[in-house]
Amino acid sequence: MTTAAVLAHFNEQATFCEAYGSPFTGQLVRRFAADLEAGGPIADLVSDWPTNPRADALALRLAGALHAAALSGRDPVLADLYPNARAQWRMDEVWPVAHAFLAREHGWISQFIQSPPQTNEVRRSIALLAGFLTFAKDWRGPTDMLEIGASAGLNLSWDRFRYRTQSWSWGGDSPVKIDTDWSGPAPPVEAQLHVRSRAACDLNPLGIDDPAQLLRLRSYIWPDQPERLARFDGAVALARQSRARVERADAAEWLVQKLAERALDAATIVYHSIFLQYPPRESRAAIVTAIRQAGELASPEAPLAWVRLEPEALTDGVRDSVRMVVDLTTWPGGERRILAYTDGHVRGVYAV
């Protein structure tokens, strides 16, 4: 891609970060843009980036590398200046140290940014919860759950989180407390989903018991958002207790196998969140086909549900939309219900 394309991506990403409550990351990415134009170490790292920088979230890869350096103490001076250690941070102090690190650690950073970001935003579970509870209102039997694109598997513990909004709450005491603004009708919080089994896959799962992989996961959380880091750490603790396991597999192939083997005495829920933009188009089509074909075989004794939190641009072809859709499709019947709209970080949910 051209330098102009990378620059446009940096500026867009900076605006996005600022709008989503991370002035630190926004200002940092704007420094990336200025350094790219000046021919500095950022230019050395990304000026010949071979693919689409926006699709690759290139700015967040770079920001994650610096955050990892701060979290790990790889650069102790940078660590002391980051929001993790200094709530009253100043970018005029951070950037010279970050700039020197970018120049000094070119090889390490170049390797770090080869892998895509994985955002384990457990607050997305409150959007998925609306789908789970809506399904549970009409189903009292056991349920087997299948998550695709699960990353580290933190959302497998969704029913062990505590959810709170201004109009409703759900769940018991938990180290993971999920708050958001909620407008519109509440989900059926009196419903109970009886989860019998959980399984998950990801093409590149990151293991929470591997210190290097755990560091990478934490590094993609914006450093001036301590509440997100706290939720992440709480979810990691729960995942370790439950020994949640994410299989390394292609989502379409894995789903075909799992749905072919699904039990005839239980419901099956397939779910995913902010995942569909990552697989190639043919893989997305294969996933949809696998679910619909399994739906044709569903029965009242073994229903199938599909719960999604995905971009409206992908689910409904609304090209310029930046909204996320929460929807539920159930079989027998194949009825699709749009339950809510939100954003990628689920800062507010607009139930319908």
Image: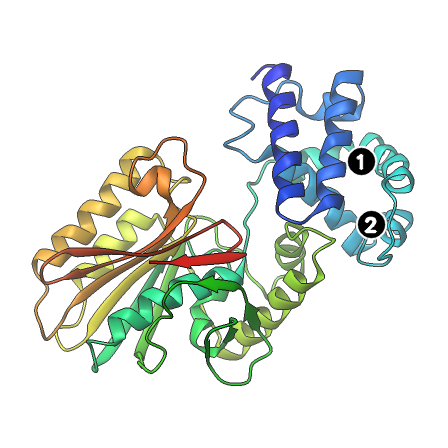
User: In the rendered image, which quarter is residue 186 located in?
Assistant: bottom left
Q: Is residue 115 above or below residue 158?
A: above
In this rendered view, identify the residue nearer to me: 291 or 316. 316
Secondary structure of the residue carrying tag 1 is loop
Instruction: List x then y, in percent, for residue 174.
Output: 56, 81
> Where is residue 225 drawn, in percent x and y?
70, 57
Q: Is residue 234 left or right of residue 268?
A: right
Q: Amino acid at mark 1?
A: Glu
Residue at numbered disc 1: 105
Does the image show residue 113? no
Q: Does 346 sit left or right of 278 as displayed?
A: right
Task: Give whichever of 181, 297 is nearer the camera.
Answer: 181
**Quarter the C terminus occupies:** bottom left
**Callout 1: few (<14), some (14-19), or many (20+) C-alpha neighbours within 10 Å?**
few
Return the x and y of residue 233 as percentages of the image width and height: 64, 68
Instruction: Assign the N terminus to one quadrant of the image.
Output: top right
Q: Are marks 1 and 2 in contact (CB under 8 Å)?
A: yes
Residue at the image point whose x is 34% and y is 39% from the top: 314
In this rendering, would 341 be left or right of 19? left
Query: 161 or 246, which is in the foreground?
Result: 161
Crowding at label 2, few (<14), some or many (≥20) Cα neighbours within 10 Å? few
| Residue picked out by circle 2 | 74
Q: Quadrant of residue 24?
A: top right
Question: Residue flagged by tag 2: what amino acid is it?
Answer: Arg
Between the C-alphas of marks 1 and 2, the distance is: 10 Å
